[in-house]
Amino acid sequence: MKKEIITQSDPKSPISEVFRALRTNLQFMKRNDDCQTILITSTVQAEGKSWISANLATTFAQTGSRTLIIDADMRKPRQHKIFQVSSTPGLSNFLSEVNDTGRRQKIDTLDCIKSTEIENLYLLPSGNIPPNPSELLMSEKLIELLDVVTNNFDVVIFDGAPCLLVTDSTIISRLVDSTVLVTSYKYTKIDDLKEAKKRIKRVGGNIAGVVLNRVEISKKRYENKYYYASNNTPTVRKEKSVKDILGNTERKSSKKIDDELDRISKIKVEPRRSSKSDNAKIDDYINDKIEDTQKQIQEEIQNSKKFKSKVEVPSDKAKEILESIKRYK
């Protein structure tokens, strides 16, 4: 098996994570309907549809689902090269009922399916390159094939031919649950993409979405968005203590730390303002104190023999109490 199956050779890479996200989107996009059969096609050749098909199928197989790739590009097949298996007998042999030696022979579907090195992943190769792929795909044998594979596999992925060059994928799109269009960054023309969509919609196909392939993204920037590291080992985030932060001279110099501490120390903290209820309690307390003091003064005046009439100047003890009340208020 070649290194093209990055989801198997490097399952913790950011690219593998993108394929898992694509798998999840396809699974939940049609929650109420079946999404068992998926066609992967492109507008023109060299956009990466075969690579997308192989890696997407691998992610389905990694979940434990019995997954089958059907190499339906019978003009320029690649899946048998990616998985390094024999290309015959295959799809064309089953549809035409002609074996790899050119003799008429009724071939069983399961006899054409080959196992791969990846657990739960199987491949139905393209077979011998026929002179009339479109006519073969329009036969009743394709419907018979779909009945067999959908009963034996959880997920079936077709790697179709480019839909603008030939009609092969347009024919298959009528029969599958969803179709995914693969485009290439700075290569696919927007008019070609619109035309491909129009052709699939015209025959009643369902387009699940578009995959933009070969986007130029910085590896360092991409990995910062995930917990995956380049050595395929998850990076464990460690909580930093104050000592770790202050002692990290590579990120902050001591002068910067001092400046930051000075800034923090100069921040003014506004005192808490008393609420209306607090002020009412203080006023009641002061009024009670004044009333008690006045009673004490009156008692002293009445008990004192030095004053025969009412005086305005209280005694020293009363003065002291009044002063303390004024200071408190």
Image (cartoon, rainbow, N blue to C red):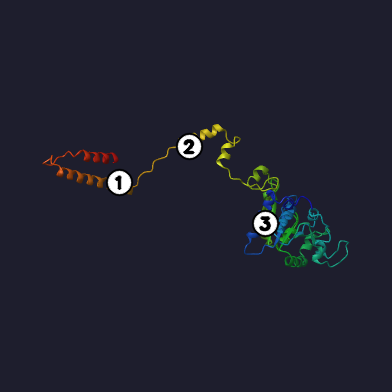
Seen at 54% across and 34% down, the residue is 257
Separation of marks 3 and 1 at Cα, in angstroms = 70 Å
Percent across and percent down for residue 167 are 74, 58
Separation of marks 3 and 2 at Cα, in angstroms = 50 Å
Q: Which residue is mark 2?
A: 264
Percent across and percent down for residue 220 are 66, 42
Whether 238 is drawn above or below 201: the answer is: above
Whether 200 is drawn above or below 283: the answer is: below
How would you rate the neighbour count of disc 3 (Cα within 10 Å): few for under 14, some for 14-19, many for 20 or more? Answer: some
Q: Which residue is mark 1?
A: 282
Separation of marks 2 and 1 at Cα, in angstroms = 34 Å
Q: Which residue is mark 3?
A: 23
Disc 1 residue type? Ile
Work out which residue is located at the far left of the displayed protein and give it.
308
Q: Secondary structure at mark 3?
A: helix
Disc 2 residue type? Ile
Res 153 quadrant in image: bottom right
Name the N-terminal-most of marks 3 and 2.
3
Res 25 quadrant in image: bottom right
Disc 3 residue type? Arg
Q: Secondary structure at mark 2?
A: helix
